Amino acid sequence: MVVLAYVLISLHVAISVALGVAVMMQMSKSAELGGAFGGGASHTMFGRKKGLDTMGKITLALAVGFMVNSVLIAFVVSRAFSG
């Protein structure tokens, strides 16, 4: 059980780094303060684009993996190191 805890923690670190990189890669010129209020949508003909691009889907999958792995780590560590 202790080995599984260390494997999950290592996986958690890898997911954390990948999630940080994925979020930083999505930042664009419209990610400034004006973009938060819809300022970037004025450059497109039909307004803001709908749906997620490929990088958005990767970021979403990493975020879900991060949350699931967090719950798994909490469960395994509580079982492994409880005595």
Image: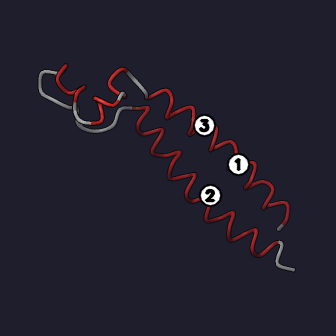
Q: Which tag, 1 or 3, sits closer to the chain's start?
A: 1
Disc 1 target residue: 11
Identify whether 44 is placed above or below 9: above
User: Residue at image x 30%, y 36%?
Assistant: 36
Please identify the residue farthest to the front as the structure is shown.
33
| Foreground of the two, 16 or 62 | 16
Q: What's under tag 2, amino acid-wise? A: Asn
Mark 2 — residue? 69
Q: Amino acid at mark 3?
A: Ala
Nearest to N terminus: mark 1 or mark 2: 1
**Nearer the N terminus, badge 2 or badge 3?**
3
**31 or 64: which is nearer to us?**
31
Residue 5 lies in quadrant: bottom right
Counting from the top left corner in percent of width and height, residue 40 is at 25, 25
Helix, strand or loop at mark 3: helix
Q: Which residue is mark 3?
A: 18
Name the image quarter holding the N terminus: bottom right
* Amino acid type at mark 1: Leu
What residue is shown at x 62% (from left), y 57% (from top)?
69
State how far apart marks 1 and 2 are (Cα): 8 Å
Category of crowding for the residue at label 2, using alpha-carbon neighbours closer than 10 angstroms: few (below 14), some (14–19), many (at least 20): some
